[in-house]
Amino acid sequence: MKTELKFESAPSIATELMVVLAADASTSKDKDASAQPVLLTKDSAIAGADKPVLTSGEFNASICEALLLHSPRELKSKRLLIIGLGKLSKVSVQEIRKAAGAAVRFAKPRGIRQVTLILPELEAVSLPAAARAVVEGAFVGDFDPDTYRSDRKDRSIEQFTVVAPTAADKKSVEAAFREGGILGDSQNFTRALVNEPGNVMTPTIMGERAAAMCKEQGLQCEVHSTDKIKELKMGAFWAVAQGSDEPPALIVMRYEPPSAKKDGPVLALVGKGITFDTGGISIKPADGMEKMKYDMAGGAAMLGAMRAIAQLKPDVRVIGIVCAAENMPSGKAYKPGDVVTAMSGKAIEVLNTDAEGRMVLADGLHYAKQLGATHLIDAATLTGACVVALGMVNAGVFSNDDATYEHFHKALEISGEKFWRLPVEDEYRDMIVSHIGDITNTGNSRWGGAITAAMFLKEFVDETPWIHLDIAGVAWMEEQKPWIAKGPSGVAVRSIVEWVRSYAK
């Protein structure tokens, strides 16, 4: 999808589809329940084109509600699409992002390939923030997962144009527009990786895709396999990988800008890359197992984040590590009751081989510290328990350091993604104490499963400031929304990038 930013009068632009955003300006004090929605543009010609419809009461401007007009008066556009943002008093960049995605997804099945969106003018949301949000939303809306359909018809939007007011601060809007394109495209890069089936996205192929991306973006990249993993004594990572005929991949990416302070922070992004998860010997039920191709979504998010970081060029050093493997049952697979020694030297008693994500992350986090990381963030589709706790709305976030978490919390205000902080308190450690080794790879009861998984990872970061993202409930959209297709979401890419940028000088 090509994107373009224009600073000119919208009515003069010839396009297949012009999009304007609207909001419900009524309040609880309004006596007239059918208060007229307001268009978020100061262009009088746009307002005149659809005034009769807005006063008819048939459009309420609820979130992502769409109203299409053909041959609008005083416009060169063939069509005018109005997309609702909900209550004016509650409009944020999140609603704007969704509306842009909804506009794109409205156009795609109708054979419309040119979409032009008028940037909303609001007091609560700056024009640069709105510009970034609409481009991100358009990219997210343009992605569809039907890659392997034999009768697939490419319905992608060819041209997405954003129209800003002529009086806008061009430099700031242009910069935000560029950032939105980079982040939206990188989120879709992650989604494309997650969407691949397990027979295509093997650990080796994931390593190859990472190396190709790094070469294209100017990042350093090394991809190691079995020999290096054994040489590094990554016993936890290898325990998971050994059950498969597919060799594992240890992917190490580096972003080292010359402008970064030599004594400044080194941020490590560590991702779980289980390209297919059967559960191993503790095998999963057959129902729904096909979705376990997305168990590498955390690792894919780190690849997408590194891709965006390379283009945005923040002044901070970043290391990306993805531990990629298959978790398979075989005569070579690790077993419940086994004791394996992690790279850190800790002895792990295996209670359940389906708790494999934390095993590979344990060695990935320790290795990141050895490579000089001063701050750590990991992402993983780690626990069903997190889905039970938070549903499919919020992802879980854990941290051992309030200052580091505050960086992430502020990043969420920009990214618009939804995470909810859960505890990692010392009282929970008793739930992973082993009687034969140091720790167990699952809790000794069914309770607090997302927390005990985080407590397990905490054992391998020591005092290093660390954030853990459990994205199990939100990495895959179980149903289509107006602004996004069913399938991989690419969650965490934007938030991780903003967290990294918060450490740049």
Image (cartoon, helix red, strand yellow):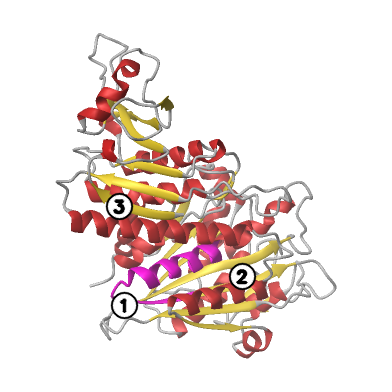
Upstream in sequence: badge 1 or badge 3: 3
Looking at the rendered image, the disc whose residue lies closer to the viewer, 1 or 3, is 3
Q: Residue at x 64, y 66 (%)?
A: 274
Coordinates of residue 462 in the picture (x, y in percent): 44, 74
Looking at the rendered image, the disc whose residue lies closer to the viewer, 2 or 3, is 3
Q: What main secondary structure does the magenta stretch of the protein show?
A: helix
Relative to residue 401, is residue 449 drawn left or right?
Answer: right
The front one of 280 and 62 is 62
Q: Which residue is mark 3?
A: 5
Q: Residue at x 62, y 71 (%)?
A: 206
The front one of 279 and 32 is 32
Q: Where is the C terminus found, in terms of image quarters? A: bottom left
On the question of residue 353 being in view, the answer is: yes
Under tag 3, what secondary structure?
A: strand
Cβ atoms at labels 1 and 3 below 8 Å apart: no
Q: Which residue is mark 2?
A: 359
